[in-house]
Image (cartoon, rainbow, N blue to C red):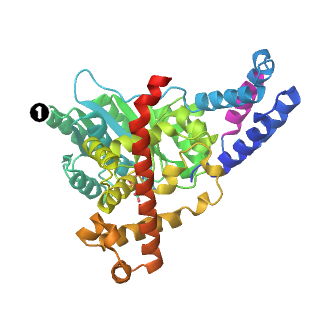
Amino acid sequence: MAFEGLADRLQNTIQKIRGKGKVTEDDVKAMMRDVRLALLEADVNFKVVKDFVKRVNERAIGQEVMKSLTPGQQVIKVVKEELTELMGGEQSKIAVSSRPPTVIMMVGLQGAGKTTTSGKLANLLRKKYNRKPMLVAADIYRPAAIKQLETLGKQLGMPVFSLGDQVSPVEIAKQAIAKAKEEHHDYVLIDTAGRLHVDENLMTELSDIKDLTKPDEIFLVVDAMTGQDAVNVAQSFNEQLGLTGVVLTKLDGDTRGGAALSIRSVTNTPIKFVGMGEKLDALEAFHPERMASRILGMGDVLTLIEKAQANVDEEKAKELEKKIRSASFTLDDFLEQLGQVRNMGPLDEILKMLPGANKIKGMDNISIDEKQIGHVEAIIRSMTKTEKEQPEIINASRRKRIAKGSGTSIQEVNRLLKQFEDMKKMMKQMTNMGSRGPKGKKKG
Ligand code: GDP
């Protein structure tokens, strides 16, 4: 996971101070020495680290913290606030032009994930903000770039404007915007050319597109795995083009986190989105506070709830509640539930959003459970309709058949049936408690 080393170290460090009834200046200084090293090791820009440590020190050694009833907690609060501030404070929103279409220029070096991110962003704009975006293929140099964008467009069912690779990018952009107006698209995402390094020709071309299209946003796509290089790239692009935001990709990989923590401070450009995987729905709005909370092991329950909301059908949820109340929850319902949880993303990533999750032993091996879920799904799918509705009829010979059909073992089938039975018992108990609820309330 991204930030793993940093998160571990910071959490161990703040753990020492958390419960202290009395915190001395020396305690804070010792903690900040550890914090400083942890940040440097995570490849955070040294000047950023220096300023950060100075600010936390000033605030933490201040009177209101030291004299408070819970100084340990207060110091941690200061660390969290400053970490949030470092990454940009408030979450920054995406622009909406009062005269549509809103034009977004996507820029970045080759391989950073620019084309993929253009597709992801268009997808997000449509799904989350109900917008009608159009993609524009303006990278005429990388041979496969236009085709790649067109393929993405097909996958998403989203229009891609292209004029091949013989027309200049400026001309492509111009015609694309005219077409978007005509067809009432409210966002235009221009996928511009990348290079292996920042070079003058590229910057001239991008400036020309900028002058002509007057974009509402210029998003730089950078690869989080490249650490300080990402920060340098952001600095050059910002000087030449004036960026409005950064999209940090590959945050699902094991980046140490340096780029995420330095970019805002060094370039004064906010991180607006983060790429969390190769799939087209793996782009998230960047929330500095939630990220700080994740790094400090305080969990990210808000993102978890949002993910659940995006993946759970409200009608189905109501139906499910009814079933639980009437104790008619079947193995088929269970299968569907598993599917919904899976849609939220890799299980280990989801669990890590829970507060304190990274302190749970064996959390690193959680992917084994992912396999177990696969087995559970296979077992249920190997049952007949009647078996799923009345699992009590599943006798020894049926168990044998199901195990064979699902490529699992009889023990696994037994375990699942037992778990399901227990779950139903628990549901019954909950329902009983629920019906007693109002009486209890009246008393109180
Ligand atoms: P471009 O040259 O900047 O247009 O880069 P591409 O869009 O072709 O992406 C380069 C590679 O990075 C592709 O294999 C993408 O699937 C991958 N990629 C992009 N964003 C992410 C991300 O957030 N996470 C992961 N794991 N891979 C990504």
Relative to 406, is 255 above or below? above
342 or 409: nearer the eye?
A: 409
Q: Position of residue 105 (x, y in %)?
A: 34, 37
Specify the principal SS of the magenta part: helix
Question: Does mark 1 have its CB less than 8 Å from ligand 1?
Answer: no
Looking at the image, which residue is at 59% across and 37% down?
A: 293
Q: Position of residue 27 (x, y in %)?
A: 85, 32
The secondary element bearing badge 1 is classed as: helix
- Which three-letter amino acid code belongs to the residue tagged 1? Glu
Residue 114 lies, in percent from the top left, at 39, 48
Q: Give the residues drawn in magenta, as a range.
A: 45-58
Q: Quadrant of the N terminus?
A: bottom right
Q: Is residue 154 above or below residue 66?
A: below
The vertical placement of 375 against 60, above or below, is: below
Question: Which residue is painted at 30% across and 26% down in the image?
Answer: 96
Residue 54 on the magenta segment:
yes
Q: Few, some or many C-alpha atoms within 10 Å of disc 1 (few <14, some 14-19, many ≥20)?
A: few
- Comparing 18 with 61, the one in front is 18
Q: Residue at x 55, y 38 (%)?
A: 291
Give the total number of marks visible in the rendering.
1
Q: Quadrant of residue 433?
A: top left
Indicate which quadrant contains ligand 1.
bottom left
Q: Is residue 132 left or right of residue 434?
A: left
- Res. 228 visible in picture: yes
Q: Which residue is mark 1?
A: 182
Where on the picture, by quarter, is residue 421?
bottom left
Measured along the vertical axis of the image, is residue 26 above or below residue 67? Answer: below
Examine the rendering and report whether any part of residue 273 can be seen.
no
Residue farthest toward the left in the current orientation of the protein:
182
Front residue of 75 and 185: 75
